[in-house]
Amino acid sequence: MTEHRGVVLRTERLTPHMVRVVVGGEGMRGFATEGLTDHYVKLVFPYEGVEYPTPFTVANCRESVPREHWPRLRTYTVRAWDAAAKELTLDFVVHGDEGLAGPWAVAARPGDVIHMIGPGGGYAPSPEADWHLLAGDESALPAIAASLEALAPGAKAYVFIEVEGPEDEQKLDVPVTYLHRAGAPYGSRLVEAVRTLDFPEGRVHAFVHGEAAFVKELRRLLRVDRKIPLDQLSISGYWRLGVDDEGWRAVKKDWNRQVETEESAALGA
């Protein structure tokens, strides 16, 4: 993936727990999306007080800087990309001073610089599906919103988004069922909503993303209980409760492999 240099153009507080940051500038020239609705970038956060090479790129840093000082990466979904204006919109879940990217987004001001790698991605709603299922927590809301905007007129979609409370809801262009966590475990409302959904007839295309534990439960429900083929699913743990992004990346492959092993056993494969 290509590295880019973005300049903050403007910010907006969408809800108490979500901040929108729009970046642009000549450093975004060459940024391009390919019709997917889950495009993501890896934002680059250098450590303060460390002398980094010029020009600043992740590749250059990894060649000349001790590993413990390599810039940290945080993955965020592209909410929107305006190629004509070269403006990239990113939405950040924020919880006070927790984390790295959230506090940066809250403090971001026009003129601030953010480096990024990307975009990557792999999902868009299939026009061949008879209906769509989209389910996720706040971290998946930007991708779900982008996906809904890409649905064909009249497409049937069941959409479940879990947020902390009513103040965290965002108005979207199609009907959405918001589930209020209200202190309950992450994803518990989502699992129950999908479990009790009366699945329509026909081919479903599902997008399920968010905290890893509930994604695992929903994957088992969809794959084992509902027998939905993998090629009809985009499903992954965006993050894991109690683990930072570096920690999650370090174990995610093994975690996924274990999930697949358990799933194969349950399916009798």
Image: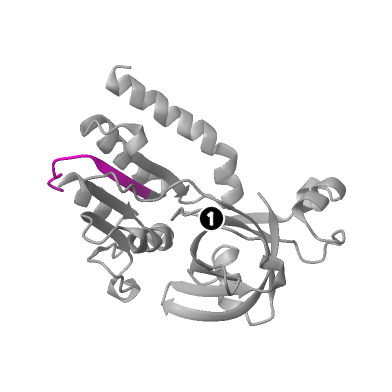
Q: Which residue is mark 1?
A: 40
Q: Along the line of sight, which residue is nearer the eye, 77 or 211?
A: 77
Percent across and percent down for residue 116 are 66, 60
Segment tinted magenta in the rendering: 197-208
Residue 104: say if magenta.
Answer: no
Q: Count all numbered tags in the image, as a single digit.
A: 1
User: Residue drawn at (87%, 49%), measured in percent from left and top?
Assistant: 64
Percent across and percent down for residue 204 are 25, 42
- Is 218 located above or below residue 10 in the figure? above
Crowding at mark 1 (Cα within 10 Å: few <14, some 14-19, many 20+)? many
Percent across and percent down for residue 143 are 42, 58
Residue 207: say if magenta.
Answer: yes
- Is 239 located above or below residue 162 in the figure? above
Quarter occupied by residue 51: bottom right
Extreme-top residue of the structure = 269
In the rendered image, the quadrant that contains the C terminus is top left
User: Residue drawn at (50%, 67%), measured in percent from left and top?
Assistant: 92
- Is 6 located above or below residue 130 in the figure? below
Percent across and percent down for residue 156 are 20, 54
User: Residue drawn at (83%, 48%), measured in percent from left and top?
Assistant: 66
Q: In the figure, is residue 155 to the left or right of 110?
A: left
Q: Label 1 is placed on what type of residue?
A: Tyr
User: Residue drawn at (60%, 40%), measured in percent from left and top?
Assistant: 250
